Image (cartoon, grey):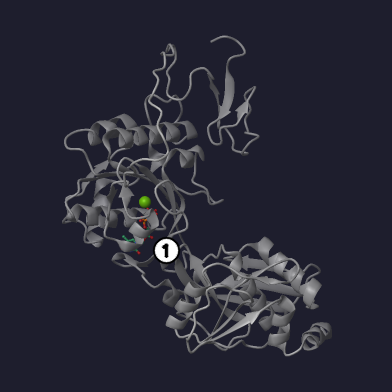
Amino acid sequence: MAKGRTQFVCQNCGTAHSRWVGKCEGCGEWNTVVEEDPMGGIGSGPGKVPKKGRPVALTALSGEIEEAPRIHTGIAELDRATGGGFVRGSAVLIGGDPGIGKSTLLMQAAAALSRHGHRIIYVSGEEAVAQVRLRAQRLQAHQTDVLLAAETNVEDILATIGEGKRPDLVIIDSIQTLWSDTAEAAPGTVTQVRTGVQAMIRFAKQTGAAMVLVGHVTKEGQIAGPRVVEHMVDAVLYFEGDRGHHYRILRTVKNRFGPTDEIGVFEMSDKGLREVSNPSELFLGERNEKAPGAVVFAGMEGTRPVLVEVQALVAPTSLGTPRRAVVGWDSARLSMILAVLEAHCGVRLGQHDVYLNVAGGYRISEPAADLAVASALVSSLAGLALPADCVYFGEVSLSGAIRPVAHTAQRLKEAEKLGFSQALLPAGSAELPKGTGSRWSEIEGLPDLVARIAGSKSALKREDEDV
Ligand code: TYD
Ligand code: MG
């Protein structure tokens, strides 16, 4: 190799370095930098002469569109998250904490597909055949025609799944166990995982089989190993949940063939995962309606409304610096709401600890929760419980104004369906449903909210100053 030609590329994030370094400057990962020949390109072995390119036919944007051919599992929550089923010839990565239920979900999907006559191959690199059989028995999946292999070598897996009739779906559990003879790195390294995943994706594209890859997630919540894997696959789903709770959420973060904001909700039982078709009922299940600081937020997950309880506890601090603890929401967003309350509503929280929790271990990612959070905070500070039959949603801006959010009608419809007869929402919200018996109150700014909850702004301030 000519001098000056080589570069050192991080296998995790793709950053190129001029010399070898132990820690990548791009992503901070250790031992991910490898020497590469920039002229070689991905997949080209040493000594290959670049072949002369052949021109391909250019075409117009308009024209026939073929629907991606899909395989429906019949598990509605899974089909919803994948955007209507697994796409043939595509690769899906399912990430999640160890023990969250990835293998359980995929075994159930495999069994369901097999019952519909599809050829499914389940390759387990983590568990022995006996263990997988035991799980299958527990899930009532053992009477199906799912084919099973316990193997980790990429070449052997390719030879196995390439033999005989083409499989409709191949499950690789997990990518962290894959290792190839062609990659000169120890099993489990970034290079090995990347090589293995690349080989599996190539198989899917060539044969038209759908490929499902399982990946573990690190403490930071990323799929362990190369982040480039997320770029290589067609869809990335995360299977999340709280160990202390039974329900699990399958969340789409990338999907080349469908929407990326859908979720599938499941409940882990002793017979595997059960679909939860109405998540709001689950999240509101254990509600204490008379507690100050508890507010129901009418949220949206993709096309689906989800009602969830937001709980706040505001208490005088005994520390020099008051504590701010958040579970299930963005802590920067909480700081913003506290600052707006302080600056525009005269609610002083500098001497108070603030704890915010989203019930059931659920995680909210919408700014529309601002109004619900602010209401919970003010309610807890004032020690006044809010009406139990009211839902809240709206985005708070830095000026203290409350801005309308999308899907007003859907949020209100779901709230009515679950027995809520009041709602507090931003002024100027479009698409308000008409002719219903419920009361929708529109609100313009955060000071109005504080006044509404505490009766008057001064009542709140006085309580604050007593401390
Ligand atoms: P598993 O699918 O092995 O998780 P992962 O592949 O993500 O590591 O599921 C592990 C947990 O699920 C384990 O703690 C046991 C529990 N479980 C049930 O509660 N019910 C069941 O029917 C099954 C199969 C597992
Ligand atoms: Mg597993």
Depth check: give the residue in front, 38 or 355.
38
Quarter occupied by the C terminus:
bottom right
- In the picture, residue 356 is in which quadrant? bottom right
Is ligand 1 closer than 8 angstroms to the Cβ of mark 1? no
Residue 275: x and y in percent read: 33, 67
Residue at the spot of label 1: 248
The answer to whether 65 is drawn above or below residue 388 in the figure is above
Residue 228: x and y in percent read: 50, 37
Three-letter amino acid code at the position of disc 1: Arg
Looking at the image, which residue is at 49% across and 46% down?
223
> Mark 1: which secondary structure?
strand
Residue that lies at the very extreme toward the top in this rendered image? 2
The answer to whether 396 is drawn above or below residue 171 in the figure is below
Residue 242: x and y in percent read: 48, 64
Total marks in image: 1
Taking the image as drawn, is residue 350 in sight? no
Image position of 355 (left or right of 346): left
Image position of 85 (left or right of 243): left
Looking at the image, which residue is at 48% across and 40% down?
231
The answer to whether 358 is drawn above or below residue 161 in the figure is below
Image position of 104 (left or right of 137): right
Residue that lies at the very extreme toward the right in this rendered image? 465
Looking at the image, which residue is at 50% across and 78% down?
412
